[in-house]
Image (spheres, rainbow, N blue to C red):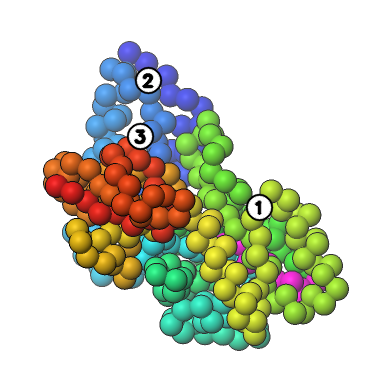
Amino acid sequence: MPANLPPNYYELEREFKAEKDPREKLRLAQELLALMPKHKGTDKLQADLKAKISKLKKQIEGGEKSHGARQAPTHDHIEKEGAGQVILVGAPNSGKSSLIDSLTHAKPMVGDYPFTTREPLAGMMDFETIQIQLIDTPPISPESFENYLSPLIRNADLVVLVADLASATMADSLRFVLEKLEEKRILLRPEVGECLDDPRFCIKKTLICGHKEYDDESGEKQAELAAMFPEYSMVTTSIIDDDSLAEFKQAVFKALSIIRVYTKPVGREADFADPVILPTGGTVEEAAEVLHKDFARKFKFAKIWGHGKFDGQRVQRDFRLSDGDILEFHV
């Protein structure tokens, strides 16, 4: 029986064979498997590809070394921590590192010259009762694009595109960043609702950050940025303006589309130190599952406290929660 593989399968297969980085090769192999029609004519191809995927996973996890040589550390994966993982991308000298330095306890190298950042660096940003992970990245420009950026961006929950409001070439630099990422099959969009026919592409929700706002005294660059990204959420920042940094934190939290739900033992005060993090629209049952799967099966009902609710109102499993709600579970 013929395999009847789609035309884009062969293009992707060529990329897979040429790729040297094991993590990117694994991603391409998984995309090949997703593209492949599932019938008797592809049984052997499926088995071969699954074997290659298994081998690549072992290699990445350190279970196998190429030709007995010690593998160099890679930067293409950072474990997620906190309420969400947010990656900052932009052109050289756009101010990503200065933002990370001002918002987290991480200490990136900050300089007035381009290409100061050579490796990704993660730090935790405090926002009210939670922490959000921010990742600083090397710049994207015609002179430089680190291959490990693609998997880092694909893995993040949110992209912040940092625009340099002090740069005369801001618009051209941003267009290059967008084009380069599209070349890598990463599309920056205001939302992720769009469905694509080609599974090789990845849509990432993006927040626009106009940085160095005090250098744009006339507001001309901010207007230009708003015209370039009319449908995107946008925030302007300066490291010398604490209010703008607070607005950045609020904008990132809102863009992550998450809610914080607090819990309280029966007859006691709520614990505000360690909220349950859920996507917007999360339910009582989903909050219970975060605490423990067995607990989610056993509890009978919950009582809720929150804005616009009756204190101690009894709610069922499918009740949709809001940010800041307090739950008291009854077994």
- At x 56%, y 85%, the residue is 110
Q: Nearer the viewer, residue 248 or 193?
A: 248
Q: Which SS class for mark 2? A: loop
Q: Nearer the viewer, residue 55 or 155?
A: 155
Range drawn in magenta: 160-168
**Label 2 Cα crowd, 10 Å radius (few <14 / some 14-19 / many 20+):** some
Give the percent coordinates (x, y) of residue 217. Answer: 82, 77
Q: Callout 3, which amino acid?
A: Leu
Q: CA distance from mark 3 to mark 2?
A: 13 Å
- At x 39%, y 62%, the residue is 83
Q: Tell me whether the residue at label 3 lies in contact with that at label 1, contact meaning CB atoms closer than 8 angstroms.
A: no
Can you identify the residue that label 1 sits on? 232
User: Which numbered disc, 3 or 1, marks the residue closer to the eye?
Assistant: 1
Q: CA distance from mark 3 to mark 1?
A: 34 Å
Give the percent coordinates (x, y) of residue 267. Answer: 20, 61
Give the percent coordinates (x, y) of residue 64. Answer: 20, 58
